[in-house]
Each structure stands twice: as C-alpha cells, then as structure tokens.
Image: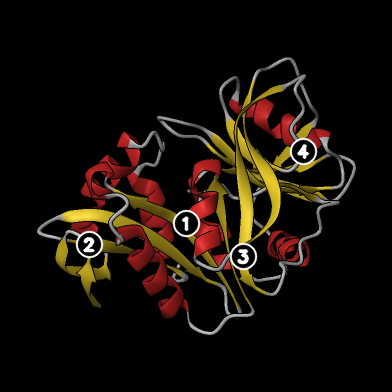
Amino acid sequence: MVFTNVTRLEVLRIRVAERNDYGLLLNLSQEEGWNYELKDFMIMECSGCSKTLVADQDGIIGMITLFDYGDIGWISNLLVERRWRKVGVGRSLLREGIRMLGKKRTIALFSTQESVPFYLKNGLVKDRDLYFIKFLGGFDGSVKKGEWNESIALMDKICFGYSREPLLRLLAESGAVVFPKDREGFAILRPGSMESTVGPVICNDNDFLYSAMSLLGVGSTAVTPYPNPRFAETIFKVTFMYLGEKPKIDYNIAQAFAGLEYG
C-alpha cells in the first residue's frame, strides 16, 4: 500500500516485513526500550496468525504487528522512528493494519499512557488499565513443571474468547510451561537474554502469577491486571483499548497476558 499527501512525505510505502528487515526492527524497538529479540519476531511470523508491516521511506521508519484470530484481531508494536513522528506515519500504519485485519468483531491493543490520545483520535475506546510489572523477589510459590497439552489452548480460549493455539505452542516451545499444583491453570515462561517474561497466565489464584515469576527470578516481567506491590514493582501502566465490540475476557482467571501483544 502506498500513502500520499502525508506531511513531510511525498510517498510512504507500507509493506509486509521480510526476514532481512528484522535486524532493523530490533534496532528500532530497542532504541525505544522494548526488549524484543529476534526469536520474538520469528515466533510471530511462524505462528501463521501474525504479520508485521513496515513503513518504508528510503528505509524503514516504522512498524506495526497484526494478529489475526478469526473474528478477533490484535494490534501491537506500532512504533515510528523518533524523527518521523507527528507527521502521519503512525496514523497511516494503524489505518493500514486495521484495513488488512478486515471486518472483525473486535480489534484490540494495549497502549502506553502517552499514546492513548492518539488511539482515541483514531476511533478506539478505553476498556481498562493493566500494569507492566517487574518481579522483586520475596515470593517462593508452589508450581509443577509440565509440557504442552490441549487443555492449555482450551483454557486460553475460555478465558480470552478466541483461539490462538499455534502462537501459544511456539511460545511454550521457546520457553517452558508450569501448572498450579492444586487447581486448573497454566503459565508460559519465556526466558530471554535481555528480559524474561511470564505470560499468558490463567488461574483463579492471584499468587500463581508470582509463583511463576519466581522461577525466572528477580527482574522478570509480566503484563497483569493485578499488580501486587509486595512482590512486584509497577514499571508503567498500559491501557487496554478496542474497536468494535467490547472484549469478553474472564478477569477472574486472567492473571497475565502474553506480553507480545503490547507496544
């Protein structure tokens, strides 16, 4: 897709990212303080339900990632190089992402606080605030390690209202799966060289999130509706926003989101 009449841009080309773009996308995200790694882009690509678009103006100046779960769509990683902000690049990427996702019951995203006005201007509405947290230690929980099984995809679909089994399988394969000892639920752990992350986490016990984080140790992160200041520091808030129908999520059991879906 080619956009014209964008301030300061004669022509802005938006295209699907190729693998040889990922190094530049990593640099772009890390300059913003996002601790993405190459494996994250590969997981999203290999899931079959995700693609990343790039804004190209004699070089990559922005990106956006799309997740297509049938009648539900997710948007993440909307990021524009600093010198190209406030000239319409982000709006063009968002508009093209929504167009490519097609007619959905809901299109959702997590917004940082500074980006909320941008999304409101582009038609999204607020759902609720969530919290990006960092584990402080001081909690030693009780979990059992396990492997992928079909109950994970089923619990995830019941909790969030859509199916994303291919993505969850890849997340589990790149990390580990743990379960609460005495009740239903699961957590996917994703150790990383830059940042270790827990998510998604589904269980009706709020402590299970911190049990899972304790396995990755101090400094591990999660995106959760339920920050506990005894065991984790809130780094920043993210606002859950959407187009279309209000997302139906069971917050009685949703302890943490996947983490790839914010930005």
Q: Is label 3 or label 2 in front?
A: 2
Q: Are marks 4 and 2 in contact (CB under 8 Å)?
A: no
Instruction: Residue 196 in the image: state x and y as whole percent.
Output: 52, 33
122 sits to left or right of 215: left
Helix, strand or loop for disc 4: loop
Q: Is label 4 or label 2 in front?
A: 2
Helix, strand or loop for disc 1: strand
Identify the residue under disc 1. 76
Q: Are marks 4 and 3 in contact (CB under 8 Å)?
A: no
| Mark 4 or 3, nearer chain start | 4
Identify the residue under disc 4. 226
Q: Amino acid at mark 3?
A: Tyr
Helix, strand or loop for disc 2: loop
Q: Residue at x 35, y 59 (%)?
A: 90
- What is the spatial separation of the Cα atoms under label 4 and label 2, in whole angstroms? 41 Å
Q: Residue at x 21, y 47 (%)?
A: 24
Helix, strand or loop for disc 3: strand
Residue nearest the viewer, comparing 110 with 35? 110
- What is the spatial separation of the Cα atoms under label 4 and label 3, in whole angstroms? 20 Å
Identify the residue under disc 3. 242
| Mark 3 or 2, nearer chain start | 2
| Mark 3 or 1, nearer chain start | 1
Q: Amino acid at mark 4?
A: Tyr
Q: Amino acid at mark 2?
A: Thr
Instruction: Residue 33 in the image: state x and y as whole percent.
Output: 39, 33
- What is the spatial separation of the Cα atoms under label 3 and label 1, in whole angstroms? 12 Å
